[in-house]
Amino acid sequence: EADPQDHRFSLQEVLDSFKLCLSENKEVYLEHYVSGWRGLVKFLNSLGSVFGFISKDAVGKINILEGYLEGDNSSQYATIQLMVKYELDNQLVDLTKRGNHPESGCRTLLRLHRALRWLELFLERLRVSGQDEKTSVMCADAYNQSLSQHHPWVVRKAAGLAFCVLPGREAFFQVMNVGSAEQVVSVLGEAVPLISEVYQITETLYAEQQLLQLP
Ligand code: 1PX
């Protein structure tokens, strides 16, 4: 029997993963990046089946990356920096159109990376929000400022509908499992800069290698 605790989301757990993500010389450990996302998916799953299509896509991508981490070339996937170099050096990335490598680590991670920007914006909005603000509006604003530009109309529409059934701010804070609203705000204050740093490092790396538009 699986421990039910294991299915319970804790924002602290996600925070811990993102803390472990950065090496001393600011490389991003893929293992902890992926486990941060696993934690976030737990949260999403605890919000109900309406979010199933989002969590399914995220899990698919997490599983692809985990496959590389456990595969024959796992040492090449220890950090995002190594992964990018390894896949590019070995022509394992479809650069301009989808071809032989539709599941490259580079293109798969890029999708999560774009979603991480949404997360950063959303969590910052939550952090500074007042009691009466709607999570659905904060979530939609963050999405429209970031991830939505990479999604076709149907996905934007479906996402918009899902946002409408998000629980209110208070219930949302409870699902985070870190205690009082003040404690949530304080953990967010720690989480947002960390997520932001991981995002920026990845963004710079992808920009340098011209990988930001991978198909
Ligand atoms: C403490 C609060 C934390 C809240 C955590 C919520 C975690 C959300 C995880 C979202 C992960 C989304 C990954 C999306 C990746 C993606 O853009 N995929 C698309 C492109 O992939 P492809 O392989 O086709 O190139 C794909 O088409 C996506 C389909 C699913 C719809 C994605 C909608 C994303 C909305 C993000 C907001 C989630 C709302 C959660 C509310 C809390």
Image (cartoon, helix red, strand yellow):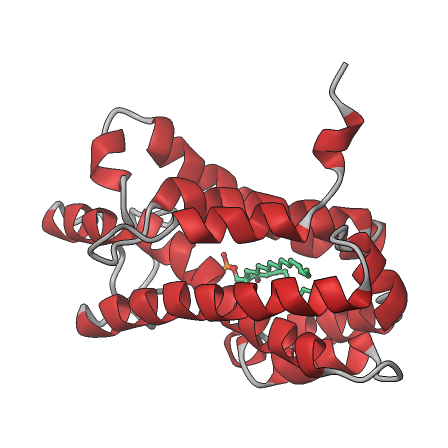
Depicted 78 relative to depicted 37: above or below: above
Depicted 63 relative to depicted 46: above or below: above
**How many numbered discs sit on the rendered protein?**
0
Depicted 159 relative to depicted 6: above or below: below
Nearer the observer, 37 or 174: 174
Which corner quadrant holds the N terminus?
top right
Instruction: Answer yes or no: is residue 85 visible.
Output: yes
Viewed as shown, does residue 170 lie left or right of 85?
Answer: right
Choose top left, top right, bottom left or bottom right for residue 107.
bottom left
Residue at (47, 64) in percent of width and height:
195
Residue at (46, 53) in percent of width and height:
18
Instruction: Answer yes or no: is residue 61 visible.
Output: no
Residue at (63, 71) in percent of width and height:
123
Residue farthest along the left direction in this orientation: 89
Image coordinates of residue 157 in percent, x first then y, are 73, 75
Residue at (84, 80) in percent of width and height:
134
Image coordinates of residue 97 in percent, x first then y, are 31, 64
Choose top left, top right, bottom left or bottom right for residue 136.
bottom right
Image coordinates of residue 213 in percent, x first then y, are 34, 72
If the picture is divided into quarters, which one holds ligand 1?
bottom right
Viewed as shown, does residue 113 lie left or right of 96?
Answer: right
Image coordinates of residue 163 in percent, x first then y, are 79, 71
Viewed as shown, does residue 128 lie left or right of 105?
Answer: right
Which corner quadrant holds the C terminus?
bottom left
